[in-house]
Image (tube, helix red, strand yellow):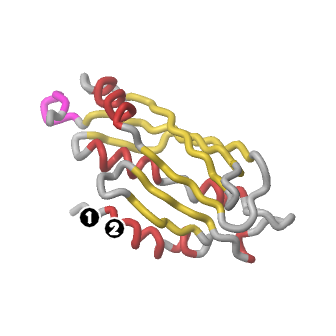
Amino acid sequence: MKLEFTPRVLRRVLNLWPPFLFAGIHVSAIGSDWRSACVELRMRPWNRNYVGSHFGGSLFAMTDPFWMLLALHALGRDYIVWDKAGAIDFVKPGRGTVWARFLLEEEALEQIREATADGAKHLQWFAVDILDGDGEVVARVRKQLYVRRKRRPGGSTATR
């Protein structure tokens, strides 16, 4: 039996999830339509690097699941969605609280639906900036999702 979460419940679960909790990562919002999320990373003594800025692994971790979670829920049960690749470009040292806002546009969902209509896999890149308290870019993160329509018994793809 697979658990189904509402955005509100998932936000609470993620905030108590040990990798996020102990890294200082806080999910402040997940949109009720699964099209947006806001997450922040609070500076703590245990998530600083040697020079006193945010540890790069924590910066990447704060963005890790969100494109996949948003797309998975926005597309629905007829799709398989998982992370395929990721990259981060560190722009400047992050100090204090940093944050990222994810916006899953309908155009991207339509592009995915069209590309997977015949059951083919589709690889889609998404990007998000991590910003500091002054709104300056600390890091740019890109995630690639693998998306495919589920196959029904007999080989046909699922239909809505």
Q: Main secondary structure of the magenta part?
A: loop
**Near-viewer residue (42 or 72):** 42
Q: Residues within 10 Å of mark 1 (few under 14, many from 20)?
A: few
Above/below status of 158 relative to 40 = above
Residue 26 place in picture, x, y as percent:
53, 69
For disc 2, the marked residue is 8
Name the front one of labels 1 and 2. Answer: 2
**Near-viewer residue (1 or 35):** 35
> In the picture, which quadrant includes the C terminus?
top left
Q: Which residues are magenta?
A: 151-157
Quadrant housing residue 128? top right
State the residue at coordinates (66%, 66%): 97
Residue 134 place in picture, x, y as percent:
70, 57
Q: Amino acid at mark 2?
A: Arg
- The tag on residue 25 is none
The verdict on residue 113 being magenta is no
For disc 1, the marked residue is 3
**Near-viewer residue (69 or 156):** 69
> In the picture, which quadrant includes the N terminus?
bottom left
